[in-house]
Image: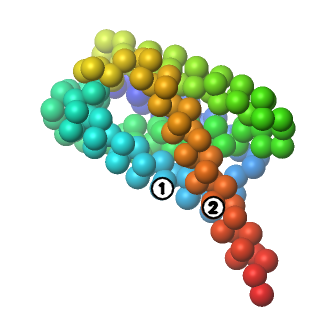
Amino acid sequence: MIGLITAIIIFNFIAFKTNKRLTSNQILHIWTFSVAFQSVFDVFVVYKYDGYWYFNKNVLEWASILPHLLLVPSVNIMFLNWFPFRTKVTKKISYILLFTFACVIYEAVTLLPEPWGYFHYGWWKLWHAAIFDPILLLILLGYYKLVCKAENKIIYSP
């Protein structure tokens, strides 16, 4: 639990202190989308297929809500804030791969024994995260672009 609370504080501090791109409306959208999307993903991988779990297996605990509500959204905000939108495709791909690598390293740290770790594997392994994380980040990018497009329609519509 110490590791989770420490990560929540550090990641949220970094996400909000370094934000130069995202508006409060975009942050609200990304936060809500992150919570909903992570929750739906976990319903299947955690509860249906026992792929991984937070804290204790087959127990829905209040503490397991913390990563959904306070950790994943801040990481997604950092990802979008630092994303190199106006660069070559190779730089964008490199950024996604580097961010995925950082996420996989963090996931490995969460596997440490308590009080630092809080994450446990069933059949899920780090290589699954390495495969799924870029896909999830691309979905996040698509959603962000959709939000930006909707904002531009509202701002510039007659």
Q: Residue at x 72, y 74 (%)?
A: 153
Residue count near mark 1 (Cα–Cα under 10 Å), binned few <14, some 14–19, many ≥20 = few
Residue count near mark 2 (Cα–Cα under 10 Å), binned few <14, some 14–19, many ≥20 = some
Residue 115 seen in this snapshot: no
Left or right position of 77 against 83: left
Left or right position of 71 against 17: left
Residue 158 seen in this snapshot: yes
In the rendered image, residue 46, in percent from the top left (x then y), is placed at 26, 35
Type of the residue with mark 1: Thr
Q: Along the line of sight, which residue is nearer the eye, 130 or 116?
A: 130
Q: Residue at x 40, y 52 (%)?
A: 36
Q: Along the line of sight, which residue is nearer the eye, 88 or 119?
A: 88
> Is residue 26 positioned above or below 49 on the image?
below
Left or right position of 37 against 92: left
Q: Along the line of sight, which residue is nearer the eye, 29 or 41?
A: 41
Residue farthest along the top direction in this orientation: 113
> Is residue 123 positioned above or below 25 on the image?
above
Left or right position of 13 against 152: left
In the rendered image, residue 82, in percent from the top left (x then y), is placed at 72, 37
Q: Secondary structure at mark 1?
A: helix
Residue farthest along the right direction in this orientation: 87
Pointer 1 or 2: first along the chain: 1
In the rendered image, residue 103, in percent from the top left (x then y), is placed at 53, 25
In the rendered image, residue 1, in percent from the top left (x then y), is placed at 34, 25
Q: Which quarter of the figure is the C terminus placed in?
A: bottom right
Q: Secondary structure at mark 2?
A: helix
Residue 107 sits in quarter: top left
**Which residue has dot 1 on it?**
32
Of badges 1 and 2, the one in the foreground is: 2
The answer for how far apart the CA atoms under marks 1 and 2 are is 12 Å
Residue farthest along the bottom direction in this orientation: 158
**Which residue has dot 2 on it?**
147
